[in-house]
Image (cartoon, rainbow, N blue to C red):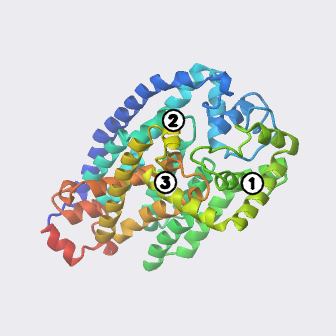
Amino acid sequence: MATLTAPNAQEEQKSTFRSLLPVTILAAFAIRLVVVCFTYRDLPDANKFYEQFGWEMGWIARALASGHGFSSPYYPWTGPTAMQPPLYPTLLSLVFRLFGIYTLTSGFVILSINSLLSSLTCIPIYFSAKYSLGTRGAKIAAWVWAFFPFAIYFSAARVWEYSLTGLLFTTCFCIAQRIHRSANPLAWLGWGALFGLTAYSNPAVLSTLPFLLILALYKVRQRGGRWLLNGALTSLALLAVLTPWTVRNYRALGILCPMRDNFWLEVYDDNTGDASLDPSSAHPSSNPVEMHKFLTMGETAFLAEKRTLAIAYIKQHPDFVIHKTVRRMFYYWTGYWSLSAEEIREQPYEPANMFYVGIVTLLMLRGAGRMWRNNRSAALPYLVLICVFPVTYYVTHPLMDYQQPIGPAIVVLAVSGALPFKRFGSSRYFHWVGAERALEPEFAPTASMTSDAN
């Protein structure tokens, strides 16, 4: 079986990082900037209340830049809010302060920042894939991300937190794959703090932390390490980061809410009708009746009413809600909702999107299966992401937008499913497991793997 010495492997890693990743990042950024040049002029549309300029996040950013504080998640001035996490609106508000509120220049700048963040995601993708696929698989995964259509579109054409969350969350995941090897308490504190920071961009990522933490602590316990202390440090760091915003929400709105308070609005909105054709019927931004209620009642009372209505509707129509949830699950991974004439009129690109999303999902599933058969320890964190993270959207909105935080993991699995093992290197074991882990007992090759490699 072919092997490489540790110094040679380390030198290969350093050489690859110096020569390949900067080129990949620059290529990714260049293609995204080209798209930005064609899209940024569509953002400042006053006739639609600048909704394309970030929707709720854009309106909150406008309030911040105008001196109204973190408030007004819709176009009218409505007071303090907790309907969105604070990180991306704050970033957007800085752009507004420097380049003007809803100006063309701000549009170009924020889409360029999104594109840069998406391009930098090649770095954690490379190291995440290297851990599970080896060096060659990591190179391919980074290049695939550079030209991945969804990664380009959602960073270069949409003002939202996708790229920021993707970079932070993929970094968290990359650390999760390796954190069990660290005995440094600061590493576990830093991991928990980074997860907390990522939650300030998209709180849905927190659903994966308990499972990733359990996997890491299990490996630490197997080695006789301080698993209980490490788990406590990670949890405390997370709580420390989340506490300030929780306190702010309680002081501003009188609610105990760690990050955002609109979950039941989304549940009610998407479980009482055909969300594919009228996705915002309960949202004040698109329904004048709901906007009047929001302005009259205030955010806290309005959302409390939606919670009551949502729970009552679920109890009265459980079969319908289950049916909608199953349809959302299927749509999340296939892009298929309906091929009715009305649907095609509203979503003319849906057939092409279905084909593309379906192919990527099939490759992802094949890659997950191959990884599971060859290295279950490496496969489990990926399974956590694709099985746990989407649950929030199965019960609310399953749009392709909300697949983006796990898009990098999907790309790595799809690369694993698309390429033959021989493309990962001359030795299936060495390149699948990764040079830096070749001597670890938990990754020792099985008999079947050795025979296949030979």
Is the C-beta separation of discs 2 and 1 under 8 Å? no
Of callouts 2 and 1, the N-terminal one: 2
Q: Between 306 and 199, which is closer to the camera in this rendering?
A: 306
Q: Secondary structure at mark 1?
A: helix
Residue 163 visible to an observer of this rendering: no
Report the Cα–Cα distance between label 2 and label 3. Answer: 23 Å
Q: Report the number of discs.
A: 3
Q: Nearer the viewer, mark 2 or mark 1?
A: 2
Q: Position of residue 77 (x, y in %)?
A: 80, 33
Q: Earlier in the sequence, mark 2 or mark 3?
A: 2
Q: Quadrant of residue 23?
A: top left
Looking at the picture, which amino acid does disc 1 mark? Thr
- Above or below residue 205? Residue 1 is below
Q: Which residue is mark 2?
A: 114
Name the residue tied to disc 1. 246
* SS category of the residue bearing label 2: helix
Q: Which residue is mark 3?
A: 332
Separation of residues labelled 2 and 1 (CA atoms): 27 Å
Closer to us: 435 or 116:
116
User: Which amino acid lies under the numbered mark 3 shown in the image of this protein?
Assistant: Tyr
Residue 337 percent coordinates (x, y):
49, 51
Image quarter in which the N terminus is found: bottom left
Amino acid type of the residue tagged 2 in the rendering: Asn
Task: Indicate the secondary structure of the residue bearing disc 3.
Answer: helix
Please state the horizontal and vertical placement of residue 192, each as a whole percent of the image.
58, 59
Would you say 445 lies left or right of 28 here? left
Mark earlier in primary sequence (1, 3): 1
